[in-house]
Amino acid sequence: MVEEMLVQILNNLKMFLANPLFLVPVVFVSVGYVFSWLFFMAKKHQPISKKEVDMLWKSHRQFSRCKAKKYEKITYGGKIVGYKCECGYEHKQKRPIINVHI
């Protein structure tokens, strides 16, 4: 029974790979998905200074009417990349891997 299933799967795979009408759209969609993810979703941590963290935290407190008295720095690779407020709010500075200038 298992052998029959494997034979059927291999036959279907051979048929799929033998017909380029099925293979070409799959390849184009896959490549398009990878490029769109790379351009729009892939990000890396951006280090920020202590002064910028203080300014971001103060603006968070002002605009969200947060009553917290302290925050905790978030570090990545030994550099400050954001903060976590006592209220639970978390800010991480990220930027796209690829910058597209138009």
Image (cartoon, rainbow, N blue to C red):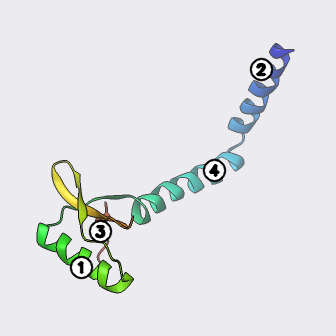
Q: Secondary structure at mark 1?
A: helix
- Indicate the position of residue 54 as horizontal and vertical percent values: 18, 73
What is the crowding at mark 4: few (fewer than 14 residues within 10 Å), some, or many (at least 20)?
A: few
The residue that disc 4 covers is 26
Disc 1 marks which amino acid? Lys
Q: How many marks?
A: 4
Residue 102 appearing in the image: no
Seen as rendered, the residue at the extreme right is: 1
Q: Which mark is residue 58?
A: 1
The residue that disc 3 covers is 99
State whether residue 11 is above or below residue 25: above
Could you tell which of marks 1 and 4 lies nearer the N-terminus?
A: 4
Residue at the image point whose x is 29% and y is 68% from the top? 99
Residue at the image point whose x is 24% and y is 67% from the top? 70
The residue that disc 2 covers is 6
Disc 2 marks which amino acid? Leu
Residue 80 appearing in the image: yes
Disc 3 marks which amino acid? Asn
The quadrant of the image that shows the N terminus is top right
The quadrant of the image that shows the C terminus is bottom left
Residue at the image point whose x is 48% and y is 54% from the top? 34
Could you tell which of marks 2 and 4 lies nearer the N-terminus?
A: 2
State whether residue 75 is above or below residue 93: above
Left or right: residue 46 versus residue 27 is left
Left or right: residue 29 versus residue 51 is right
Marks 1 and 2 sit apart, C-alpha to C-alpha, by 62 Å
Name the mark nearer the viewer: 3 or 1.
Answer: 1
Residue at the image point whose x is 82% and y is 21% from the top? 5
What is the crowding at mark 3: few (fewer than 14 residues within 10 Å), some, or many (at least 20)?
A: few
